[in-house]
Image (cartoon, rainbow, N blue to C red):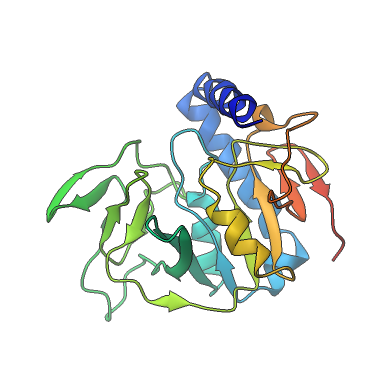
Amino acid sequence: MARNKHFLRLHFREEVRSLSLAERRLAGRAVARRVAALPEFRRAKKVGLFLSLPYEIDTAPLIALAHAAGKTVAVPVVFPGRGGMRFAVLADGRPSLKQKVSFNRSEVNRGGKKIPSPYPSPASGRGKPLQFAQELQQNVYGILEPVSPQWVEGLDLLVVPGAAFTSRGDRLGAGAGYYDRFLVRRPSLRTIGVCFDEQMAVRLPRAAHDRKVDQVVSPSRLFRVRGV
């Protein structure tokens, strides 16, 4: 099964890479609008999101909408040695008297130096580069994380990345199992998987430890697995 999952990840990543940057940005905005319209999102005060890699749906528009709605946005911080994951505040980058540091997400910190991120800075829902009011760095997987995390507990909603999903809520993750381990301890936490239309699969291999999501949102479809 592990070998099958590996080749499926490669397949769906290539499907995403075949899309133009303009197509990816449009898809990210469409997913953001669909998620923002859901009652689970409107009710949520603390929302777990993720900072996208090049082969994942662009979450910048949804992050911008969540901040504009006054929600606490939290992103994952992983602990590879323990295989654990916690969520930390992603501060709103809009101008504020309290904010002293703000830089474009196209620049991240590694070893005290600013370097370009692995992908172009996507546009926010307002057509401007998304700004963060804190220092970020890449973890061992190349994903941006807060350098000085302010931990968030008791998420109301978690938006989950994936290499692929099915309409039944099955998810093909990156293979490290962080989200599966996080969710198994929080069975009541509402989850929404987000992806490109090209990442929707008819079937996916599923092991006993693989966790389903409650809903799957793509640019053109919404699949509800577990009711409100």
Quadrant showing the N terminus: top right
Question: Which residue: 39% across, 49% down?
Answer: 128
Quarter of the rendering occupied by the C terminus: bottom right
Q: Nearer the viewer, residue 102 or 10?
A: 10
Count of numbered badges drawn on the protein: 0
- Return the x and y of residue 109 as percentages of the image width and height: 20, 53
Nearer to me, 211 or 52: 211
Q: Residue furthest right?
A: 227
Q: Is residue 166 above or below residue 169?
A: above
Q: In the image, is 81 to the left or to the right of 191?
A: left
Point 81% across, 46% down: residue: 223
* In the image: residue 157, left or right of residue 223: left
State whether residue 125 appears in this view: no
Residue 9 percent across, percent down from the top left: 57, 29
Place of residue 110 in the rendered image (x, y in percent of width and height, measured from the top left): 19, 50
Camera-side residue: 83 or 85?
Answer: 83
Residue 209 at what x, y percent from top left? 68, 51
Question: Relative to 38, does residue 169 appear above or below in the rendering?
Answer: above
Is there any visible trace of residue 197 in the rendered image? yes
Which residue is at a point 55% across and 60% down the rendered structure image? 65
What residue sits 53% from the left and 59% below the top?
49
